[in-house]
Image (tube, helix red, strand yellow):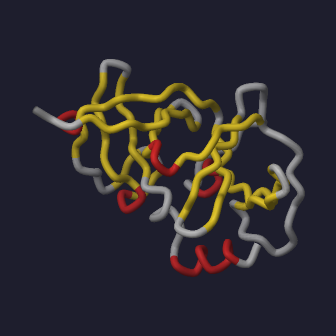
Amino acid sequence: MADTKQFVGFQLRNEHYGVDIMGVEEIIRLQDITPVPRAPDFVEGIINLRNQIIPIVDLRKRLRMPVPAENENTRIIVMKIETRRLGFMVDRVEEVMYISTDLIEDAPGMSGGVQGNYVDGVARTDKGMIIILDVVKIFSPEEHMQLSMI
């Protein structure tokens, strides 16, 4: 019998994605973001969340996708990445998904504008394909260094 994993499901454009729920600390509504000079182009800025400064990464920009205007569905997924907290802007958070590991296939070389090294796998579910992202691998070592200076 296959194991089941939990993912937070979200949308970027019209594609469905998931991240391991174990790294997710909370999901918040979009709030005022303060720009940071000389930050990488995918960093929108910072927010003050309960007296902690959190860099906000626009996941659409990072994955080189067109960026629609924010709306009432735009959310920030706050995650623990190694030793720090980062917020990821997404178009819409959908649900917590329980996916059998039998349904998760190895990552393809390219998928919907996301390079394969960012992708942990692709799950074929009754709701369609879900691209499972590894948020640590989204950033190069140099980008991790840049983010640590924010």
Residue lying at the far front in this picture: please name it.
50
User: Quarter-wise, where is residue 147 in the image?
Assistant: bottom right
User: Quarter-wise, where is residue 45 in the image?
Assistant: bottom right
Q: Is residue 103 left or right of residue 21?
A: left
Measuring 86% from the left and 51% from the top, which residue is drawn there?
Answer: 33
Q: Percent x, y for residue 99? A: 31, 31
Residue lying at the far top in this picture: please name it.
126
User: Quarter-wise, where is residue 52 in the image?
Assistant: bottom right
Q: How many marks?
A: 0
Task: Name the quadrant of the C terminus.
Answer: bottom right
Measuring 80% from the left and 61% from the top, which residue is drawn there?
Answer: 53
Q: Percent x, y for residue 87? A: 67, 52
Q: Percent x, y for residue 105? A: 22, 43
Q: Percent x, y for residue 86? A: 65, 58
Q: Is residue 45 left or right of residue 8?
A: right
Q: Is residue 8 left or right of residue 73?
A: left
User: In the depicted view, which residue is nearer to us: 144 or 107?
Assistant: 144
User: In the depicted view, which residue is nearer to us: 67 or 22?
Assistant: 22
Q: Is residue 53 left or right of residue 142?
A: right
User: In the depicted view, which residue is nearer to us: 142 or 27?
Assistant: 27
Measuring 55% from the left and 46% from the top, which residue is drawn there?
Answer: 24
User: In the depicted view, which residue is nearer to us: 89 or 15?
Assistant: 89
Task: Name the quadrant of the N terminus.
Answer: top left
Measuring 67% from the left and 77% from the top, which residue is drawn there?
Answer: 146
Residue lying at the far left in this picture: please name it.
1
